Structures are given as C-alpha cells and as structure tokens.
C-alpha cells in the first residue's frame, strides 16, 4: 500500500516549490470522508485514493492533480460536496474533482446511455483541462490492478470497457506504459487460460531471449561507437497482450514469432537519429516497407521516433526505434513528460490535441448514446496513414480511410459539396483506400449535396457524423413543412393555442410541427384535440422524396388515388388506395393525399405485356418503352400456352400521364395482345392464376430498395 509520505517525497523531488502541506491536508480530508468505507477486497477505501495519487506522482504531475487523485471519489461516494472541496482546496481542484464525478443523480434509460453520458461529461471536462483524463486513467489503472476481487460478470464489463476506451485513451495521450499495463491486466482477467499459456512460453524462453538481447545490445552499441555516435541502446521484451494480438491477427502460434525483443537507441540530438539509422541499416538488412519516420511526421498524440525493422542474426527480425532523450521521455510518459502546468499555463497544450477537439465536437452533435460510443471507439482505435493536400498540408487519417474522409477532414462544407477526387493526379472513385504519401485534390460543386450512400464509403466518425447531421437538418425542415400543412388544414387560420400545446405536450408550435411531421403525434390524436373529424383531402405538394415516398408494397405513382401514413424516421409513406396492406392496418391515421408530380422525379411501377411469341418482339417492346422516355429497371419473361410470351417490366415513370403514354406506345407494337399495369395483387384486377401472383411477389421482392436507394440522389 502507498503511504502519503512516499507520495509527498516523490512530488518534492521533481517539484521543490509544491505545497506539500496542502497535499497532506487533502489526505487527511479524504481519510475522514472515507472513514468506515471498505473496498471489495476488504481493504480500507482510502488505499484506493492513495494508490491513484501515487500513480499521478510517478507521472510527475503537479500538486493540484495529485490532490485531485486523493479527493476524486469524495463527492461521489461520501457526503462531501463540491462547495466543500472549493472551500478547503480552491476552485481549480474543485473543477478537476467535478470532472471526475460520475452523473449519479440523473435517470438513464439504459446502462449504455449512462456509460455514454459519463464518458461525455469526462471528455467535456478534459477539453477544458486535460488533467481530468490523466486522473481518470490513474483511477482506472488501479481499479484494474484490483479487479480480481470483483465478480466475474463485472470483471468482464470493466475489462472490455478498459480495452475499448481507456487503453486507447492512454495511447492517445502518449502514456504507453499505462496502456500496456491495462492491456496485459485485461488479457489476464478476460482470457486467463491463454494468458497463462503465453506466460509459460515466455518463461521457458526467457533465458535465451535475455542472452540474445544482451548480445545484440552490445553489437549495436559497438557499431554506433565506431562511427563516433554517443548513444544508449536498450533492449526490451514486448508485452504479453501485443504478442497475443499478433498471434490472433496473423493466425500463427508462439514459435512463429521472431520479434519478441525490440531495441531503442536514444541519442542526444535530431541529426544523430538519422546517423544512427544509417548505422543500423549498414549493420543489418532492412525489411522493405517497415521504415516509418515519426520525427518528420509525428503521430497526432505528439509521439516522435524513427521506426525500422531489420533482419538480424540467424534471420531473426528485429524492431529498432531511434529517438532523442526528450522524444523518449514523451514516448514513455506522454503529455505528462513536459507538463505545462508546472509553469502554471495549460492553455497552449490544447492546440496539440486536435483529436480531443474533434471528439468534443462529435459528442456535442451526437444524440444517440450507442452511436456516440461506437464513434468514440472508432476514433480511438487509430492506426494512421498520412496523406497530403494539393498544397502540401499533412492530414493523418485512420488506416482504411477513403477520399470522402479526407474531404471532411479538410472542412465539413468541402465534404458536403465533393463531386470527385484526384489521387496523385488521377481521377479516383470514393471507394479507393488511401495510402501513405497520397496527394489528394478534392473537386467540389455548389450543386452537390451528400448522399446516404456515402455512409458506406466513409470510415472516420467525423465524416459519418457530418453526413448524418446534414440529413437530420433536411429532415427537420421537411417535417416542419409537413406539420405546417397539416395544422393549416386542421386549424384553418387559427393559431395554435396553449391548450392544444399542453394536451399534446409540446413546448411551442415548432416542436408541434416537427413531431407531427415525423409521425410522433398521430393525426387522429391531433384531430381529437382540435375537435375535427377529418382533414381529407390533405394537399401535399413540393415535398422532398426524403420525407414523402411511395410504399414498396404497392408502388403508387403521382396521379394515383393515395393515402398517406406517417412513419417515424421515414416521413410520409404513400400507399395506393387499393393497397391490401391498408386494410390490415389501423385506417384512422391514413390521410387522403393529393400527390402531384414534380419534374425530374421518377417512380417505379410494373407493366405486364402479353405478346405473340415471335422473333424481335422483346426488342420492339423495350424500344417503345425507351422512346416514351421511360427506363427499365428489371425484366422477367415467361412462356405461356398458345405461343404467347408474358413479359413483366419494372419501369420508371413520372406520373400516371407518363405511364399512359408508355402503355399506348407498347399497345401499338404489332403482335402485342394485352398491356396492363401490374404492381401487387388487387391493384389492377386479380391475376389469372396463383402462379402469376407468386411471380409478381417474387419480382417485386427482388427489387426491394434500401432507404438510400429510395432517394434518387447524386451517385458517387
């Protein structure tokens, strides 16, 4: 167990001006607050805050952060308030403790919702002061060290959360030893059998590995000295989780891993880094494609180093990292290595953490907790590729990123209006994977707008969220227009009164319009409140297809007698009045709609053609359809008795008048016996046989369209 005098001695060793008395008072305060409380292990609860403070002191954190480690659970788990903390220790420490305090007083719909809100609060607090996140990592690390006392189900939940969120966060801050210890602890708790087997394998080879490490350290050290380079060479074993992960990823066993030992070369200055790289490459043959220059192109978390892999003695692959002392300190301790708060100024450090700013923007725009947590996980599990703009600016993107990810990384509006890209001077499509060193030029047009299909191409949370937000804004505007139309038909020129808003539980008329337009408030419920029986027919014209579209069960087209029903998230779904599905549902929420065609919008419908079986008939019919300015989406043929061929077309038309022109054109073809519109059973007469009914159902089920295909948007 850590002792307070050991913590204060460590703080005094790196911060002689620190207020040691204040740290001691914080310990006494926390001990009194947690008096009588015990952990699951049976130890006094104060052992946990002491351990957290000890970890923070080992990171070289300032006195305020160490004190926060001592006090971080007082507000959440005792009768102490934030006002008490501020009174005794000041506003700075009170703000840090508040950032650490979970949201315990709010009712959540699910555990996922609670987890998302807790994480949201922590990230918002971190955006203001990154020390909040460092304290949280120290807190989670000690909890992981004592996780063995928890129930197995809790161990799994906490372990998975640590692996998915907190270990990547430690990596993002550059505190790699915390990341590695967290990963190894999770591995030991969640996969104990695999962990113990791997530990045994390492133990059996430990003596030989240590001999190899010492021998190679000497060889590399002597080579550097011969070239007059002052350097330290350090060999180290890879941590267990990284070995296990590599075995799983490459589907190999332990005996096939030859890079268990890695080496670091620490030099005095930047120039010597590259000279040392030349010495290593002259000593051993480099592995092609395995050199990475993180000095010229630092990682987003500030990490800098040269990485190379070489083929060493006995054909063993050796990983070598070359860096200066300052780079090494940052690689081990991350942001804590040159802690800016030691100088009393934390503002400038935030500029180096663009990922944190982007994460903050992401959580402010995301409403769905599941979507938010998924975006966080995607954002944290990052292996970067580095690409260049046309002007030479560097953009780090996740491995597997596509051109649209780059466009949205430049600016949201650039992404929204992107019509195409050039990669290394050549036109490329949106599905192209970006590679290190690619130079990308984005082509834009003010007439372009996002397509729902783009979600399939983008990989970054920022791009996904920007596209979703654009559609949410469009949906909101369209919902307001639909709601206005319905209110106008139901109220006439009257204003929406307070009584109506209260009964429908809406804060104002805008909220009422949106909820009606989304279908959250049923039309019959609105009519009950305003004292009307019906508002038929409802005239809806000029609506975007994203919020008003034809039902796939009956494929109506403008000019058909249609009934509309609101569906949450889809807007108004229009059914043909004779659609069989209407009789199966509650009819009171269906509205009679006057649906007018709009130029350029096409809708699918079916046509059945029966013709004499003769050469060239199919070509003649398809040519007639094309000459009538219609397009064929699908086609099915069937031979019938009496030398008659049955053709079933799925065509696109603007409205009933356009369909009539297509039908007349087909009827004029010599040899055509019969032409009728066919969508579903019961829509235009009953099919003559059960077989035809099954054919129709199969035909339309094959052409069921996804939501993104319903909207005739610009294709990538």
Image: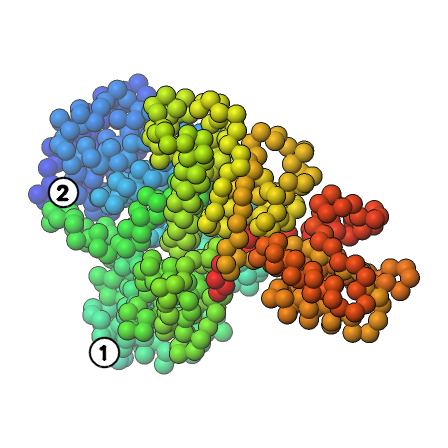
Viewer-proximal residue among 396 and 340: 396
Which residue occupies 50% across, 32% down?
A: 535
**Residue 615 figure quarter:** bottom right
Which residue occupies 41% across, 74% down?
A: 423
The circle drawn on residue 228 is 1
Confirm whether residue 141 shows in the render.
Answer: yes
The residue labelled by disc 2 is 12
Confirm whether residue 167 shows in the render.
Answer: no
SS at mark 1 in the image: loop
Image check: 600 left or right of 119? right
Residue 403 in the image: state x and y as whole percent. 42, 66
Structural distance between the alpha carbons of marks 2 and 1: 38 Å
Give the label, 2 or 1, closer to the camera: 2
**Residue 82 figure quarter:** top left
Viewer-proximal residue among 598 and 137: 598
Q: Which callout, 2 or 1, points at the residue further toward the start of the chain?
A: 2
Name the image quarter holding the N terminus. top left
> With respect to residue 261, does 427 lie above or below?
below
Residue 46 in the image: state x and y as whole percent. 28, 27
Residue 698 in the image: state x and y as whole percent. 74, 52
């Amino acid at each position: 167990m850590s002792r307070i005098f050991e913590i204060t001695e460590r703080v005094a060793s790196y911060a002689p001006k620190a207020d040691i008395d204040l740290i001691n008072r914080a310990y006494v305060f926390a001990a009194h607050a947690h008096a009588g409380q015990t952990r699951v292990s049976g130890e006094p609860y104060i052992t946990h805050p002491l351990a957290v403070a000890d970890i923070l002191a080992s990171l070289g954190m300032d006195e305020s952060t160490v004190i926060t480690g001592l006090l971080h659970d007082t507000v959440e788990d005792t009768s102490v308030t934030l006002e008490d903390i501020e009174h005794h220790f000041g506003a700075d420490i009170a703000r840090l403790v508040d950032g650490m305090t979970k949201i315990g007083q709010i009712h959540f719909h699910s555990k996922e919702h609670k987890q998302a809100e807790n994480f949201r609060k922590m990230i918002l607090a971190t955006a203001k002061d990154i020390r909040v996140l460092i304290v949280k990592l120290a807190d989670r690390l000690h909890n992981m060290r004592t996780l063995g006392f928890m129930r197995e189900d809790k161990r799994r939940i906490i372990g998975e959360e640590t692996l998915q969120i907190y270990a990547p966060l430690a990596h993002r801050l550059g505190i790699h030893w915390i990341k590695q210890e967290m990963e190894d602890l999770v591995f030991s708790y969640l996969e104990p059998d695999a962990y113990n087997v791997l530990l045994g394998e390492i133990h059996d080879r430990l003596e030989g590995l240590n001999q190899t490490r010492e021998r190679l350290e000497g060889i590399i050290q002597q080579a550097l000295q011969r070239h007059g380079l002052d350097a330290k060479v350090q060999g180290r074993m890879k941590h267990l989780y990284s070995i296990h992960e590599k075995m799983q990823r490459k589907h190999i066993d332990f005996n096939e891993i030859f890079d268990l030992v890695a080496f670091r070369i620490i030099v005095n200055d930047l120039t010597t880094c590259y000279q040392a790289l030349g010495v290593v490459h002259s000593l051993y043959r480099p592995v092609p494609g395995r050199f990475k220059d993180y000095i010229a192109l630092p990682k987003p978390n500030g990490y800098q180093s040269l990485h190379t892999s070489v083929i060493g003695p006995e054909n063993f692959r050796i990983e070598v990292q070359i860096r200066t002392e300052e780079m090494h300190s940052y690689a081990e301790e991350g942001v804590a290595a040159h802690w800016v708060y030691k100088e009393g100024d934390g503002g400038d450090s935030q500029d180096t953490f663009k990922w944190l700013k982007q994460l903050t923007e992401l959580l402010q725009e995301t409403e769905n907790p599941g979507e938010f947590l998924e975006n966080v996980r995607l954002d944290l599990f990052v292996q970067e590729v580095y690409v260049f703009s046309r002007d030479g600016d560097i953009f780090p993107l996740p491995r597997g990123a596509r051109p649209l990810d780059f466009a949205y990384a430049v600016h949201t509006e650039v992404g929204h209006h992107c019509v195409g890209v050039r990669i290394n001077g050549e036109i490329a499509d949106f599905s192209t994977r970006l590679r290190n060193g690619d130079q990308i030029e984005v082509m834009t047009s003010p007439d372009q707008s996002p397509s729902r299909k783009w979600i399939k191409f983008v990989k970054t949370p920022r791009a996904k969220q920007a596209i979703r937000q654009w559609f949410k804004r469009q949906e909101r505007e369209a919902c307001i227009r639909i709601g206005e139309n319905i209110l106008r038909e139901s109220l006439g020129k009257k204003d929406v009164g307070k009584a109506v808003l209260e009964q429908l539980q809406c804060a104002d008329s805008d909220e009422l319009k949106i909820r009606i337009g989304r279908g959250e408030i049923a039309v019959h419920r609105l009519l009950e409140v305003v004292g009307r029986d019906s508002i038929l027919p409802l005239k809806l014209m000029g609506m975007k297809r994203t919020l008003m579209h034809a039902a796939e069960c009956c494929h109506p087209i403008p000019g058909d007698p249609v009934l509309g029903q609101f569906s949450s998230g889809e807007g108004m779904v229009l059914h043909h009045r004779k659609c069989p599905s209407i009789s199966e549902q509650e009819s009171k929420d269906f509205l009679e709609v006057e649906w007018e065609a709009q130029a350029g919008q096409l809708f699918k419908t079916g046509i059945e053609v029966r013709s004499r079986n003769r050469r060239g008939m199919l070509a003649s019919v398809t040519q007639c359809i094309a000459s009538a300015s219609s397009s064929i989406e699908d086609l099915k043929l069937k031979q019938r008795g009496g030398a008659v061929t049955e053709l079933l077309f799925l065509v696109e038309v603007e409205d009933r008048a356009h369909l009539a022109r297509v039908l007349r054109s087909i009827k004029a073809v010599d040899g055509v016996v019969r032409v009728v519109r066919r969508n579903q059973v019961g829509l235009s007469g009953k099919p003559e046989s059960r077989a035809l009914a099954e054919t129709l159902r199969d035909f339309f089920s094959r052409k069921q369209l996804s939501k993104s295909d319903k909207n005739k948007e610009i294709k990538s």
